[in-house]
Amino acid sequence: MCEANAYLIQENENKLIMEAVDTIQPEKEGVTLVSIFGDQKFLKACIHSLSLVDHKVFLKPLG
């Protein structure tokens, strides 16, 4: 499977926000994450970087 885990970059660590992310939808004020199970989460954040080999998405808070 090719899902990724999403992490929010914080001061000293990367906090796991959602596992098995299938879709990241850009929104006007941030991004919506959708998992393979249909769970959805909206974050006021933007994509900082991707590690495709490790299946990780790193998000940076807006503001």
Image (tube, helix red, strand yellow):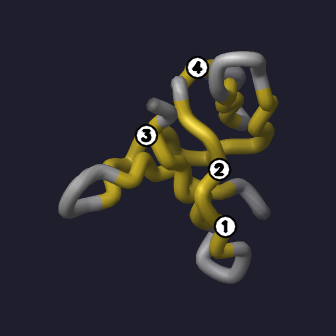
Q: Quadrant of residue 57?
A: bottom right
**Circles 1 and 4: CB distance less than 8 Å?**
no
Q: In the rendered structure, which amino acid carries the disc numbered 4? A: Phe
11 and 58: which one is in front?
Answer: 11
Q: In the rendered structure, which amino acid carries the disc numbered 1? A: Leu
Q: In the rendered structure, which amino acid carries the disc numbered 3? A: Ile
- Read off the residue under disc 4: 42
Helix, strand or loop under label 3: strand
**Circles 1 and 3: CB distance less than 8 Å?**
no
38 and 52: which one is in front?
Answer: 52
Q: Which of label 4 and label 3 is nearer to you?
A: 4
Residue at the far left in the pictured view: 12
* Labels 2 and 3: the sequence-earlier one: 3
Q: Picture coordinates of residue 55 (x, y %)?
A: 64, 68
Other-residue count near label 2 (Cα within 10 Å), few / some / many at <14 / 14–19 / ≥20: some
- Read off the residue under disc 1: 50
Residue 34 — which label? none
Q: What's the residue at 46%, 51% (across, down)?
A: 7
* Labels 4 and 3: the sequence-earlier one: 3
**Circles 2 and 1: CB distance less than 8 Å?**
yes
Q: Which of label 1 and label 3 is nearer to you?
A: 1
Q: What's the residue at 79%, 38% (across, down)?
A: 23
* Labels 1 and 3: the sequence-earlier one: 3
Residue at the far front in the pictured view: 63
- Read off the residue under disc 3: 17
The CA span between labels 2 and 4 is 13 Å
Helix, strand or loop under label 2: strand
Helix, strand or loop under label 4: strand
The CA span between labels 2 and 1 is 8 Å
Q: Which of label 2 and label 4 is nearer to you?
A: 2
Q: What's the residue at 60%, 77% (across, down)?
A: 54
Left or right of residue 26, residue 59 in this image: left
